[in-house]
Image (cartoon, rainbow, N blue to C red):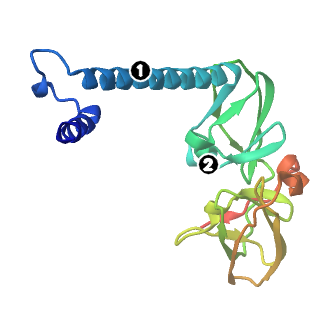
Amino acid sequence: MRMQLSLVWEMRPQAMIFRPESLEGGTWPAGKQISRGRAACGIFVLLLLMLGSAKTVAAQNDVMGELQFEGKTKVERDSGVWIDGNYVGYLKELNGSKKIMLLPGEHQVIVRQSGYVDFVQKVVVEPGEKRLVVVSLHLAPSATVPEVTATLKLKIKPERAAVFLDGKFVGHVGDFGGAFKSMKISPGKHRVRVELPAYQTFETEVNLLANQESEIKTQLVKGSIEQNTPLIKKPDDKPQQKPQQK
């Protein structure tokens, strides 16, 4: 009975811990050989699973193509991007977890900034390849800045949501919030709409006096992309007044 207890005590640690200094006569005890074989088999299976996972990711990249963006100035990097009529975010954030992966074929890219002519380009995406779109915006001839202004600040989450003033895209929330950022608009009544795919649209009206300061504070509620308005899906191409950023 003592020998059996002794054998059980010795085999339990040896089944999990492999120490070369415990070799007896240059060979592993039988229990260790079995445990080492099982461990090696387990590692081999794990490597096969990892390799299979890597191949799956590679296969996904081989099917889709990636669209990358480069903006020459802060104006371009803070501009809104629409692909095939759908708003996807502002230019400088479209990388990493927000990188744009598209099915192969032709796609239309529109980059918009208040007071600038839309950048429009058709691109052909190839499977497994990256395509760089270099964006350069030019001031719209009809863009004007109001002589008398009121100040509107936005404290809205998520900050990447698109902002529309009287139906015109003027930027994303992050452009108009924080200690040194705001929107300079003409006094009077204005409709403010904030949208982001998969969130419910927020809309409100402000009526500001000359030199008055106001702030809109809210958080968008999760919803469905089907709840978004045509502003998010197909921007208005008409010339717009340029709000002055502070």
Q: Which of 20 and 65 is in front in this view?
A: 20
| Image x and y of residue 87, in percent | 77, 47
Q: Nearer the viewer, residue 115 or 80?
A: 80
Residue of label 2: 75
Number of residues whose C-alpha sits closer than 10 Å to that of mark 2, classed few (under 14), some (14–19) or many (20 or more): some
In the image, residue 22 sits, relative to residue 238, either above or below, namely above
Mark found first going from the N terminus, 1 or 2: 1
Q: Indicate the amino acid at tag 2.
A: Val
Mark-to-mark CA distance, 1 and 2: 57 Å
Q: Which residue is drawn at 78% across and 52% down?
A: 197
Label 2: state its secondary structure. Answer: helix
| Image x and y of residue 180, in percent | 53, 69
State the image quarter where residue 4 is shown: top left
State the image quarter where residue 243 is shown: bottom right
Would you say residue 218 is visible in this rendering? yes
In the image, residue 238 sits, relative to residue 71, either above or below, namely below
Q: Nearer the viewer, residue 54 or 107?
A: 54
Q: Residue at x 83, y 70 (%)?
A: 203
State the image quarter where residue 161 is shown: bottom right
Q: Indicate the amino acid at tag 1.
A: Cys
On residue 41, the disc is 1
| Image x and y of residue 82, in percent | 77, 42
Drawn side of residue 175 relative to residue 243, left or right: left
On residue 63, the disc is none
Total label count? 2
Q: Which of marks 1 and 2 is in front?
A: 1
The quadrant of the rendering that contains the N terminus is top left
**Outermost residue to the front:** 1
The quadrant of the rendering that contains the C terminus is bottom right
Number of residues whose C-alpha sits closer than 10 Å to that of mark 1, classed few (under 14), some (14–19) or many (20 or more): few
Label 1: state its secondary structure. Answer: helix
